[in-house]
Image (spheres, grey):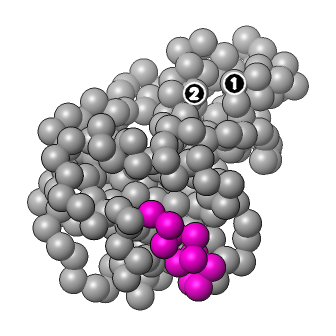
């Protein structure tokens, strides 16, 4: 059983939705890609996600209040997914999947992401990374969401939202010049990463990065 705690943190340099996930079940040995080139901007610094998993994928379904039975009925179409390893957070709107094949190349994983993202019942299929290849709790789950804070000396908020929504984003909420977007359409699973780079590099935002899930320790 996984337990989830969502914290929306508003800070002066930005905000991010963090999820604390405790995995109680034994975890198999991680299989990771060799490359670790994916990053997001934090200020002017590049923060690297680590290595992409060769055996795990994260799914968000199109509809809400998904049951385990419904999730299994959708995912049973895909022979590369291990149905017995489907685990949901609170309900099964979002699920963590294992690939039942021994892959050696992230191109194969990314092709599976593209295949899943063609499914009308799936909103997004995205990659999972590990910042420490020896620590199964060092996961970073990329979400199809983007968090931004505009530079009000450069652009008005309304103009910025128009600009962002021209880049395959839909505004979910905006407060204190901070914006929370989701991707309108997901095809590769990497859109939030690529678009957040484009926005930050445009100079229109003080920060712009994809939303993601990580493990945090509460004391």
Instruction: Answer with mark 2 or mark 1, whichever residue precedes in sequence.
Output: 1
Which image quadrant for residue 170? top right
Q: Which residue is rendered at x = 31% and y = 85% of the image?
A: 24
Res 8 seen here: no
Report the predominant secondary structure element of the magenta stretch: helix
Q: How many numbered marks are there?
A: 2
Q: Nearer the viewer, residue 202 or 114?
A: 114
User: What segment carries the magenta color?
Assistant: 68-78
Label drawn at residue 167: 1
Inspect this view and state whether residue 125 appears: yes
Is 48 situated above or below 32?
above
Is 212 in front, or is 73? 73
Q: Which residue is mark 2?
A: 195
Residue 171 is situated, as x and y percent measured from the top left of the image, at 78, 40
Q: Quadrant of the C terminus?
A: bottom left
Direction from residue 108 to residue 71 in the image, left or right: right
Whether residue 162 sits left or right of residue 23 in the image: it is: right
Q: Is residue 73 magenta?
A: yes
Vertical order, 34 against 201 (above or below): below
Residue 175 locus on image (x, y percent): 79, 44
Distance CA(mark 2)–CA(mark 1): 7 Å
Q: Are marks 2 and 1 in contact (CB under 8 Å)?
A: yes
Does residue 65 lie above or below 15 as drawn? below
| Residue 4 % position (x, y) | 51, 76
Task: Please tell me the numbered disc located at residue 54.
Answer: none
The residue that appears at 79% across and 47% down in the rendered structure is 173
- In this view, the residue in front, 37 or 79, is 79
Based on the picture, tell me whether residue 171 belongs to the magenta stretch.
no
Q: Secondary structure at mark 2?
A: helix
Q: Residue at x 53, y 15 (%)?
A: 201
């Amino acid at each position: 059983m996984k337990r989830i705690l969502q914290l929306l943190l508003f800070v002066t340099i930005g905000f991010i939705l963090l999820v604390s996930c405790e995995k109680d079940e034994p975890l198999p040995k991680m299989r990771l890609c060799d490359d670790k080139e994916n990053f997001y901007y934090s200020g002017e610094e590049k923060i690297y996600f680590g290595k992409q998993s060769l055996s795990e994928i994260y799914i968000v379904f199109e509809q809400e209040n998904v049951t385990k039975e419904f999730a299994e009925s959708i995912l049973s179409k895909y022979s590369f997914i291990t149905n017995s390893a489907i685990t949901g957070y609170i309900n099964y709107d979002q699920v963590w999947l294992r690939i039942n094949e021994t892959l050696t190349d992230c191109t194969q994983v990314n092709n599976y992401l593209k295949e899943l993202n063609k499914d009308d019942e799936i909103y997004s299929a995205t990659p999972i990374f590990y910042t420490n290849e020896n620590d199964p709790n060092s996961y970073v789950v990329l979400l199809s969401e983007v968090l931004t804070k505009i530079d009000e000396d450069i652009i008005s908020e309304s103009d910025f939202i128009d600009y962002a929504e021209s880049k395959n984003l839909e505004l979910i909420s905006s407060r204190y010049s901070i914006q929370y977007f989701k991707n309108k359409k997901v095809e590769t699973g990497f859109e939030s990463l690529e678009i957040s780079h484009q926005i930050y590099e445009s100079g229109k935002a003080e920060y712009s990065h994809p939303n993601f899930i990580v493990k945090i320790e509460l004391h």
